[in-house]
């Protein structure tokens, strides 16, 4: 008769084990491809042969998975390592002496190329590990928990993720976000990080740690959750759905405009999706539309300029080459300069830093709204899936190049060697000081000496990570460096992965990079226009003039200086809005902000008065800089002093204005205004237009308005 008198427990990072079902124990048993320590305690040991085996704990055929991925389903398995230098085995036999009361082995996920998530667990603990010796046995359950392609997630995995995300971004009864996502993780990415973690070699290490900090917070709420990735070099339709990160309006334009951080369309969610109540600080909803068909195309793809994309050059490392630096070039072109640094060649294969420009930057700017501007990007939770994919590229590069030694300069995505003379530097915002840039921003929220702790992976000294801590994140050089995360296609420890690395895995990596379709036309356009404006300063006056004839003259004057394939000049005013007003918000240009305040006063006194820029954008700009004119009391006064905006919302400009006011108003104020100003006919119009199949963009805006009103009414005490 077999008795259950062997105890199997995963070992915490402090070397201890914890009682089953304790709070800490519930965080244990989640592994990646990197081996984790398993302790087996034996009672009444008589010596003999200990056998480690495994079995699936659930029927994987019942996974609620997108149909196109069901054929890839496989049974997740682990590898047992007698020690860290041993080869992993699916079954392990160890001879035990009579005087041994416990034994430690290592357990890591088995990489299964071509299968679903390459063999990682789909959604929960699904592997039972069993140890047997003589007539004794014991079991423990585990999950190969890695960051997976978000387009391939099960329904449960999606629901778990968005619920955990919502849990760390809780809102008060007024709809204002007061959770750690808003107070800490959004604030970490505004001006404080703009120059210290962007346009520099710290970009990849800083973002690796930033993502890990957030992921550990999510796992406190649900240990089965990982920070998955948006594989933006191929279509990802299941991400852009109302049951996940939001259905998004598609707008096609040969030369799209970037209104930095602003969009008049919104991510749309199902009623049971907690993200429908999303807010960051006072601002409700997620401003977003895509320039690409998010149900059929990869990020940034634009058929109208396909020739331009096909000529773009791409670079990767080829480990098989004897120099280990083979350049794969579609078109040879030297592109000097990187964020204003003429000494840096972003196409130099001694550096991986060009990744920040393309594909990272191109993925950001293929979306209009929060995501396309550094200080607003994390307001959209899609941001973290985008950056998880960028982090995944770096992880693959490290595996292919075997770049894990923190003291080896070749392990860093560097501009030049001098950038890495201080790899032991502690990183903002986890260290105490203000940012070493012109903003002198103090660490936000609760981040000082408070990088989120893990019970299974590395904890930093004083909870402050250093640059070098980001390098050996998979514990390839030293297991104590292991940060506790992994990707479904980056597995430096697995036997099968190592054998296939230079063949199919590298081939897929190369192909994915060559398939990237950047969307840089708008950047070229802005440079051309900026030069025209600098050479012809009077044109700005003509474009913003209320005089129709003068504005027409300005357009004609510019048209003669533009390439024939250039932008639709009817949108030129929108370009100047971007160039002039939105940048003023983030640069604190007092003179221009004063002009915006004046425009707001015009609207407030007589809402139908014409202004030179979008009424909705005026409100947005003032609200973003916390202008007192767009606070609750003044929003109420706005409606008291102005024409009833509800009566004007059939005009899209006033619909945009009303939505923008409500995105910054408290739920109490929204209820009050609706009770006083909105008729039954108005509510019927909003409901009917939110289902307008004829104009998806208009329907999206009415949905946003209806959602804001319903959320306010639902929270009424």
Image (tube, rainbow, N blue to C red):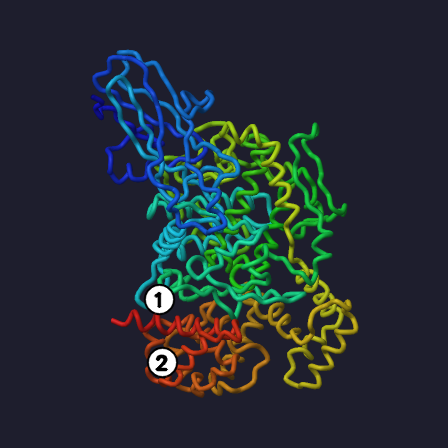
Q: Is residue 368 visible?
A: yes
630 shown above or below 137: below
Q: Quadrant of residue 455?
A: top left
Q: Quadrant of the C terminus?
A: bottom left
Q: Report which residue position mark 2 lands on.
A: 673
199 shown above or below 135: below
Q: Where is residue 528 in the image (x, y as percent from the top left)?
A: 73, 64
Q: Where is residue 246 in the image (x, y as percent from the top left)?
A: 46, 61
- Front-most of residues 595 and 222: 222
Q: Residues within 10 Å of mark 1 (few under 14, many from 20)?
A: many
Q: Is residue 450 visible?
A: no
Instruction: Give the residue displayed 24% in from the left and 33% down from the top.
Output: 19
Instruction: Give the residue displayed 70% in from the left and 58% down from the top.
Output: 306
Q: Report which residue position mark 1 lands on.
A: 175
Q: In which quarter of the image is the N terminus?
A: top left
537 horizontally vs 196: left or right: right
Q: Is mark 1 on a helix, strand or loop?
A: loop
78 horizontally vs 136: left or right: right
Q: What element carries label 2?
A: helix
């Amino acid at each position: 008769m077999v008795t259950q008198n062997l105890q199997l427990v995963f070992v915490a990072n402090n070397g201890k084990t914890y009682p089953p079902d304790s709070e800490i124990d519930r965080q244990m048993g989640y592994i990646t491809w990197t081996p984790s320590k398993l302790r087996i305690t034996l009672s009444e040991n008589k010596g003999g042969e200990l056998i480690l085996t495994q079995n699936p704990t659930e029927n994987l055929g019942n996974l609620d998975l997108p149909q196109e991925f069901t054929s890839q389903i496989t049974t997740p398995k682990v590898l047992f390592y007698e020690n860290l230098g041993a080869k992993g085995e699916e079954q392990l036999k160890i001879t035990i002496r009579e005087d041994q009361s416990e034994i430690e082995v290592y357990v890591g996920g088995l990489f299964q190329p071509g299968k679903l998530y390459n063999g990682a667990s789909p959604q929960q603990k699904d592997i039972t590990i069993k140890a047997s010796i003589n007539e004794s046995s014991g079991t423990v359950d585990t999950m190969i928990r890695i960051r997976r392609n978000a387009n391939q997630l099960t329904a449960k995995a999606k629901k778990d993720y968005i619920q955990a995300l919502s849990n760390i971004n809780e809102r008060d009864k007024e709809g204002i976000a007061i959770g750690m996502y808003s107070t800490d993780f959004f604030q970490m990415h505004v001006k404080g990080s703009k120059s210290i973690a962007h346009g520099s070699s710290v970009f990849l290490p800083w973002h690796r740690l930033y993502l890990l900090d957030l992921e550990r917070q999510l796992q406190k709420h649900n240990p089965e959750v990982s920070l998955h990735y948006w594989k933006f070099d191929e279509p990802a339709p299941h991400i852009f759905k109302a049951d996940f990160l939001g259905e998004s309006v598609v707008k096609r334009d040969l030369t799209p405009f970037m209104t930095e951080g602003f969009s008049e369309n919104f991510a749309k969610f199902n009623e049971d999706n907690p993200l429908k109540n999303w807010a960051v600080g006072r601002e409700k909803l997620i401003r977003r539309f895509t320039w690409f068909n998010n149900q059929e195309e990869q990020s940034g793809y634009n058929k109208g300029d396909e020739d331009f994309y096909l000529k773009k050059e791409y670079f990767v490392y080829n480990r098989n080459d004897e120099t280990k630096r083979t350049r794969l070039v579609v078109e040879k072109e030297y592109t000097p300069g990187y964020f204003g640094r003429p000494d840096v060649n972003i196409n130099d294969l001694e550096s991986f830093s060009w990744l920040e420009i393309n594909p990272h930057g191109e993925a950001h700017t293929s979306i209009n709204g929060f995501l396309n501007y550094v200080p607003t990007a994390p307001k959209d939770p899609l941001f973290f899936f985008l950056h998880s994919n960028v982090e995944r590229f770096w992880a693959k590069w490290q595996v292919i190049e075997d770049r894990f030694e923190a003291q080896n300069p070749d392990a860093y995505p560097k501009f030049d060697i001098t950038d890495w003379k201080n790899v032991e530097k502690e990183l903002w915002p986890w260290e105490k000081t203000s940012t070493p840039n012109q903003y002198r921003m103090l660490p936000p929220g609760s981040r000082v000496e408070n990088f989120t702790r893990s019970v299974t992976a590395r904890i930093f000294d004083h909870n402050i990570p250093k640059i070098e801590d980001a390098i050996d994140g998979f514990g390839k050089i030293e297991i104590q460096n292991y940060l506790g995360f992994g990707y479904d296609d980056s597995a430096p420890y697995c036997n099968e992965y190592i054998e296939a690395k230079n063949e199919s895995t590298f081939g897929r990596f190369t192909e994915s990079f060559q398939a990237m379709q950047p969307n840089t036309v708008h950047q070229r356009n802005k440079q051309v226009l900026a030069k025209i404006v600098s050479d012809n300063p009077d044109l700005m006056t003509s474009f913003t003039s209320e005089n129709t004839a003068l504005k027409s003259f300005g357009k004609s004057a510019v048209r003669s200086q533009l390439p024939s394939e250039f932008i639709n000049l009817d949108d030129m005013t929108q370009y100047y809005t971007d160039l002039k007003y939105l940048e003023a918000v983030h640069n604190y240009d007092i003179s221009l902000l004063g002009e915006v305040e004046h425009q707001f006063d015009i609207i407030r006194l007589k809402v139908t008065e014409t202004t030179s820029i979008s009424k909705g954008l005026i409100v947005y700009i003032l609200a973003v800089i916390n202008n007192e004119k767009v606070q609750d009391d003044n929003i109420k006064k706005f409606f008291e002093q102005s024409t009833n905006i509800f009566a004007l919302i059939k005009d899209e400009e006033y619909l945009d204005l009303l939505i923008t006011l409500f995105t910054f108003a408290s739920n109490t104020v929204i209820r009050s205004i609706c009770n006083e100003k909105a008729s039954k006919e108005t509510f019927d119009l909003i409901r009917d237009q939110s289902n307008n199949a004829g104009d998806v963009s208009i329907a999206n805006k009415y949905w946003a308005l209806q959602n804001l009103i319903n959320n306010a009414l639902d929270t009424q005490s």
